[in-house]
Image: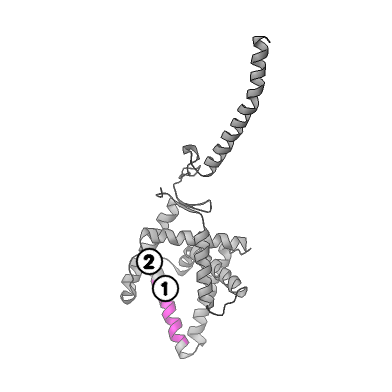
Amino acid sequence: MGKEMRFSLKKSRLLPIVFGSAVMIAACCAVAAANGSFPWNAMKWQTDSGEAVEAYVNGEPILKKTLDKAIGDTRKMEEITARLFPSKQKSSKSESEVLDDLIKAKVLKQEAEKEGITVTDRDALDSLRATDRQIQDLMENGSEEEKKNAKESWDTLTSVASALHESMDQYEKNAVPTERNILIQNRLYQKYVAGHSSMTETKQEMWDGHVAELMKKADVKHRDSP
């Protein structure tokens, strides 16, 4: 048998081995990439438009500018509360606690979307204005106790708006994102408790347990995490 024939036979025997090895390497690469083991598969902590990302919640980013605004708004409200209502002053929230609030809000928003629950900015603004009308109606037509409580609520709203140097209309528009999150959580809560019952837990306890489970299952990655 000539050298060329022997080489050809060796080559034909090696092909399945080489091909099999290539498949194994490709499979290992795919697994490693999926697990983030390669540097080129590292989390992107900057969007394509150059905005810094602070965290990911089930693949959805929370931008640093969103966190910065939330921290600024929290500090502003803490300052106003301390100035207007000294007896109600609470300890200041840490930046990590503010981020935790944003993460929780995003987890619940994602769950609401799965459940077909949507809340628009218009819904949120309508809700705020409906609350205003209800307060004003109670101030005029409620019982003495209702009138007193309604006036305290209205005075609080107008005092905060004044401290922010905003008209009530502007204050309500700026409160839309917060109100939207509140409505989403309320509707999700109502839907959940309507479909569940317990002999040992209250509705709130069932809901708190459900939220804790959602948070536990959520894939959350922080910028500063190793």
Q: Is residue 79 visible?
A: yes
Magenta span includes 54: no
The residue closer to the viewer here, 86 or 93, is: 93
The mark lying in front, picked from 1 and 2, is 2
Residue under numbered circle 1: 158
- Residue 12 or residue 135, whichever sits in front: 12
* Residue 126 percent location from the top left of the image: 56, 69
The label shown at residue 77 is 2
Q: Looking at the rendering, which quadrant does residue 84 occupy?
A: bottom left
Tell which residue pokes out farthest to the top in this image: 2
In the picture, measured across the screen, residue 197 lies left or right of residue 157, that is: right
- Residue extending farthest to the bottom is 144
- From what the image shows, is residue 109 above or below residue 168? above
Q: Is residue 157 magenta?
A: yes
Instruction: Give the numbered dot on residue 138.
Output: none
> How many badges with numbers are in the image?
2
Q: Secondary structure at mark 1?
A: helix
Q: Which residues are magenta?
A: 146-159
Q: SS for tag 2?
A: helix
Amino acid type of the residue that numbered disc 2 sits on in the rendered structure: Met
Residue at 57% x, 62% y is 111
